[in-house]
Image: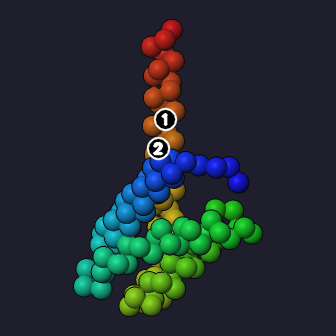
């Protein structure tokens, strides 16, 4: 294991926590946009980053495919959402996240293309 200074460790930890908070708020808003507002509580947003970590930990599935959705479905049913709705939300969240990743990738390609055109 490489040694990291305390300053770098704190910086990485801060960025990671900020990332979790953003994912949680985004998932919470995603749930509010597609489901009944009465059932959705702010703590439900924490399911997405936790499910993402579970998906990363599982080594037999690339990107946690299936495991993240299963964890989300179980978590949402425990928090009061029907199993049918929870499964639908889990699959939609995978598509939502993939769309976001594709959007960032496409923007970076366009910016790189624009930078190359300017330098010519």
Residue depicted at x 48% and y 15%: 117
Quadrant of the image containing the N terminus: bottom right
From where the camera sits, is residue 12 visible?
Answer: no
Q: Secondary structure at mark 2?
A: helix
Residue reaching furthest top?
A: 120
CB contact under 8 Å: marks 2 and 1: yes
Residue situated in front as seen by the camera: 56 or 100: 56
Placement of 112 over or under 36, stated as above or below: above
Q: How many marks?
A: 2
Q: CA distance from mark 2 to mark 1?
A: 6 Å
Placement of 80 over or under 7, stated as above or below: below
Q: Looking at this view, is 16 or 31 the one in front?
A: 16
Neighbours of disc 2 within 10 Å: few (<14), some (14-19), many (20+): few
Residue drawn at 45 percent across, 29 percent down: 111
Q: Going by the picture, which residue comes out furthest to the front?
A: 6
Disc sitting over residue 47 in the figure: none
Q: In the rendering, at what x and y percent does residue 38 appear?
A: 25, 85
Q: Position of residue 21 (x, y in %)?
A: 37, 63
Q: Tell me the SS state at disc 1.
A: helix
Q: Position of residue 67 (x, y in %)?
A: 62, 75
Asked whether the viewer can see residue 113, the reply is yes
**In the image, farthest residue toward the right:** 60
Q: Crowding at label 1, few (<14), some or many (≥20) Cα neighbours within 10 Å?
A: few
Residue found at x 45% / y 22%: 114
Residue nearer the viewer, 18 or 111: 18
Q: Which residue is mark 1?
A: 108
Q: Which residue is mark 2?
A: 104
Left or right of residue 26: residue 103 = right
């Amino acid at each position: 294991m490489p040694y990291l200074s305390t300053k770098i460790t704190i910086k990485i930890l801060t960025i990671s926590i900020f990332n979790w908070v953003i994912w949680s708020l985004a998932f919470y808003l995603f749930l509010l946009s597609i489901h009944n507002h009465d059932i959705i509580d702010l703590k439900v947003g924490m399911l997405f980053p936790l499910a993402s970590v579970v998906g990363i930990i599982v080594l037999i599935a690339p990107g946690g495919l299936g495991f993240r959705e299963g964890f989300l479905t179980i978590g949402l049913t425990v928090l009061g959402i029907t199993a049918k709705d929870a499964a639908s939300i889990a699959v939609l969240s995978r598509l939502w996240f993939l769309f976001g990743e594709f959007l960032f990738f496409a923007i970076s390609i366009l910016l790189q293309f624009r930078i190359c055109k300017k330098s010519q």
